[in-house]
Amino acid sequence: MSEILINKSDRDQPLSTELLPVTLVLDCLRSAYNVGNIFRLAEATRVGKLLLCGYTAAPPHDKLAKTARGCEHKVPFEVFAEASEALLTLKRQGYRIYGVETAVQAKCYWEMQVRFPSAFVLGNEALGISEPALALCDEFVALPALGEKNSINVGNCCAVVLYEALRQKTLLCQPS
């Protein structure tokens, strides 16, 4: 059997300078650990910015830092009192707003056609996206849940949607 080489250190070569034209809007997330996880996902996928809304934890924060593992210093973020305020700002800048929600009219994530620049709104783990923010979403996207619960952890959900957006952006950039 050949030796399997595992990369156990952070990247030492230059990072991609191209950012994914995606902004994440975190609407009143309760768990600072989930927020830290999302910072780490955002750094891994080269997300442009995080907008932390309502009582979502923001750096500096010990619990957030524990799961972000330094990524909170690498990903730009802004804090907004309300998600609706953040979304109105993005709409003025030409963003397509995708609510990641269990809405009846939501498309399954693999059916969505991401239009860039885009923003993905992720809501409170128990309550979902706030009503004023829901009203500002252009489309809804969901992950199928076949078990008793109708949703999964917000950080896991964010990972699925981000990697689908990255896949679609990468395919768009491929030479024909």
Image (cartoon, rainbow, N blue to C red):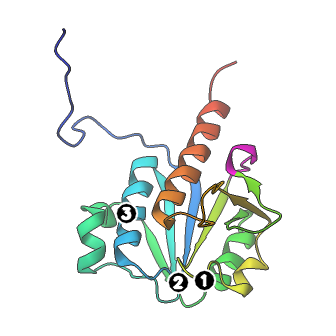
* Residue drawn at the location 77% of the way across and 61% of the way down: 106
- The residue under label 3 is 37
The mark that comes first in sequence, 3 or 1, is 3
State how far apart marks 2 and 1 are (Cα).
9 Å
Q: Quadrant of residue 24?
A: bottom right
Residue 69 against residue 133 in the figure, above or below = above
> Which contiguous range is marked in magenta?
109-116
Front-lying residue, 64 or 22: 64
- The residue under label 1 is 127
Residue 102 at x, y = what percent? 70, 67
Is there any visible trace of residue 75 in the rendered image?
no
State how far apart marks 3 and 1 are (Cα).
20 Å
The mark that comes first in sequence, 2 or 3, is 2
Residue 74 against residue 123 in the figure, above or below = above
Q: Give the residue type that dot 2 points to.
A: Cys
- The residue under label 2 is 28
* Residue drawn at the location 76% of the way across and 71% of the way down: 137
User: Badges 2 and 1: C-beta atoms under 8 Å apart?
Assistant: yes
Residue 63 at x, y = what percent? 26, 77
Q: Give the residue type that dot 3 points to.
A: Asn
Residue 110 against residue 128 in the figure, above or below = above
Image quadrant occupied by the C terminus: top right
In this image, 4 relative to 67: left or right?
A: left
